[in-house]
Structures are given as structure tokens and as C-alpha cells.
Image (cartoon, rainbow, N blue to C red):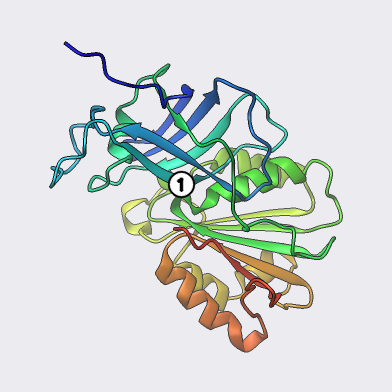
């Protein structure tokens, strides 16, 4: 019997936190020194098509090629000063190719980690000291975790606001960490919201879709940061429909998308 060629594997799964059966935080340690990256950037993970998949995954049609490396990009959630591992916040897509294999990967299992991070979804184009409003649904929270973990320690001039939407409270990854940060950092406000409160009666936070909370002025009320492009930049990552609606909602207030040579005050993660 031939030995599977896993020579492309250059990293190990060294940490896994299961938030629920379809949502995990994964820590990956490279065999060589970790690449440099900016908070908000993403990296590529990969597994061969021959790797096992979780039982709840949909049937693959056609089946993946056994010796072909399946690669996907995921935003990095860990701090850029962390040099031992990179952390990813991943949701199981039962019809997908890679996540059913990632979720089946055991602790200590080997996988592929791309040699560099990339992406422009960073704070580089935001003026120093200007407030940032970080809006996400689901695992779109990941790049914001990297920003907060890296910058909130020393950046006391800038106000940070996180508005995170999910269906249920148990889908609000990093909630405990974010609540703790909000208690100890005067310049940070965390606003979690769920869209199915009738099925999650013990949650005492806000409910409703992101756009509804924006229309109600929840951000201004809780953080004191105005929805004014002269005072705050807005970042959007998550459900494409949410991004579209929020951009339309903010346009009358003077917010404009940031595009290459045309600087703007709305920054969108495009790879979602």
C-alpha cells in the first residue's frame, strides 16, 4: 500500500475550542517561524482531498481528488505579536470541501498553512486616533479579534466599537473575552445581538439584525461614537446581504467605500 503524500503539510493543529457542533476556534502552529502579518489580514489553510470528513457533511459530487490540496482563505483572529501559532474562527459548511475536513482533523493533526498572510482589510488607511466601528456577522468577527488583541493594549486614543450579529447567543464566538475587554477598556464597546431571541430566551442582550440596530442608534447610545464619517470609519465583514444593506444605509450619512486609490470610510472584506 502506498503512503499518502503529505509533503505539502507544514503545520499542526495545536488547539481547538468547539463553541457548538458547527463553530470552532482553531490554533495552527507552523513548522517554521511564523510569517509577519497585519491585524485584519488572512492566511490560507489546506488539506488533501483524501482526508476524512465529518459525518454530517453532504455527499461530495464529484468526490475531491485524493492528492489535490484543497485550499481556502481564513481571516486570522490571533494577535500579530503572537509568534507561536495563528488562530482561526471557522464555521462548518456541510456542502463545502475544506471545512468538513478541518472539523474532522484531530488535535495534533497536520495540515497546510500558506507561507504568508495577505489582504488590505487593515487599519492602515484609517487616520490615527479616529474611531473605528467594526461590524460583523458570524465568523466575520475574526479579523476584528486580531485588531483588538494587537492594538487595544496600547492604543488608548482610538475608540473601538464591535457590533456582532448571530442567530443565537451560542453562536457569539469570543463573547466572554470581548465582554471582559469592554469592562477593562474605556475606549472599547462590545454590542452583541441575536436574530432569534424567541428560541434563546436566556440571552439578555440586544436582538435584531445589524441594520435594525444601526437605524435605532444603538451604537451612538452605547458607545458615544457618532455615525459620522468625519469621526469614525466603519468596517464590514460577514454576510454579503448585510454588507450591501449597511452600505446603502450609511450612504446618506456621507460614508463612502474605500477603493484603492479612492480613500473612503467604509472598509469591506471582499473574500467572504
For mark 1, does the 10 Å Cα neighbourhood hold few (<14), some (14 to 19), or many (20 or more) residues? some
> Where residue 181 sits in the image (x, y, percent)?
69, 42
Asked whether, in this view, residue 48 is left or right of residue 241, the answer is left
- Extreme-bottom residue of the structure: 252
Above or below 101: residue 199: below
Above or below 264: residue 107: above
Query: Camera-side residue: 139 or 192?
Result: 139
User: What residue is pinned by disc 1?
Assistant: 73
Q: Give the SS element for disc 1.
A: strand
Query: Camera-side residue: 23 or 120?
Result: 120
Q: Quadrant of residue 90?
A: top left
Residue at 71% x, 75% y: name it.
Answer: 263
Residue at 41% x, 46% y: name it.
Answer: 171
Q: Quadrant of the N terminus?
A: top left
Query: Camera-side residue: 252 or 214?
Result: 252
> Where residue 178 sits in the image (x, y, percent)?
62, 44
Q: Quadrant of residue 268?
A: bottom right
Q: Quadrant of residue 247?
A: bottom right
> Where residue 119 sits in the image (x, y, percent)?
59, 54
Query: Camera-side residue: 268 or 19?
Result: 268
Amino acid at each position: 500500500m502506498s503512503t499518502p503524500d503529505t509533503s505539502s503539510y507544514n503545520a499542526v493543529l495545536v488547539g481547538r475550542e468547539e463553541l457548538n457542533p458547527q463553530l470552532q476556534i482553531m490554533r495552527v502552529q507552523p513548522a517554521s517561524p511564523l510569517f509577519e502579518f497585519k491585524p485584519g489580514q488572512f492566511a490560507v489553510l489546506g488539506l488533501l482531498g483524501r482526508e476524512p470528513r465529518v459525518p454530517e457533511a453532504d455527499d461530495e459530487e464529484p468526490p475531491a481528488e485524493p492528492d489535490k490540496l484543497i485550499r481556502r482563505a481564513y481571516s486570522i483572529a490571533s494577535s500579530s505579536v503572537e509568534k507561536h501559532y495563528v488562530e482561526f474562527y471557522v464555521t462548518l459548511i456541510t456542502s463545502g470541501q475544506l471545512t468538513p475536513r478541518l472539523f474532522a482533523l484531530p488535535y495534533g493533526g497536520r495540515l497546510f498553512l500558506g507561507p504568508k498572510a495577505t489582504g488590505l482589510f487593515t487599519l492602515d488607511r484609517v487616520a490615527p486616533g479616529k474611531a473605528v466601528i467594526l461590524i460583523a456577522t458570524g465568523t466575520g468577527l475574526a479579523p476584528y479579534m486580531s485588531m483588538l488583541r494587537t492594538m487595544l493594549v496600547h492604543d488608548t486614543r482610538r475608540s473601538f466599537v464591535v457590533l456582532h450579529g448571530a442567530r443565537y447567543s451560542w453562536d457569539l464566538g469570543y463573547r466572554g473575552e470581548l465582554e471582559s475587554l469592554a469592562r477593562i477598556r474605556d475606549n472599547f464597546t462590545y454590542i452583541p445581538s441575536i436574530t432569534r431571541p424567541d428560541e434563546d430566551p436566556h440571552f439578555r442582550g440586544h436582538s435584531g439584525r445589524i441594520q435594525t440596530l444601526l437605524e435605532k442608534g444603538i451604537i451612538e447610545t452605547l458607545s458615544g461614537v457618532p455615525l459620522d464619517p468625519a469621526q469614525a470609519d466603519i468596517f464590514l465583514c460577514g454576510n454579503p446581504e448585510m454588507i450591501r444593506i449597511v452600505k446603502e444605509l450609511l450612504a446618506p450619512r456621507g460614508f463612502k467605500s474605500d477603493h484603492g486609490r479612492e480613500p473612503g470610510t467604509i472598509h469591506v472584506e471582499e473574500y467572504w
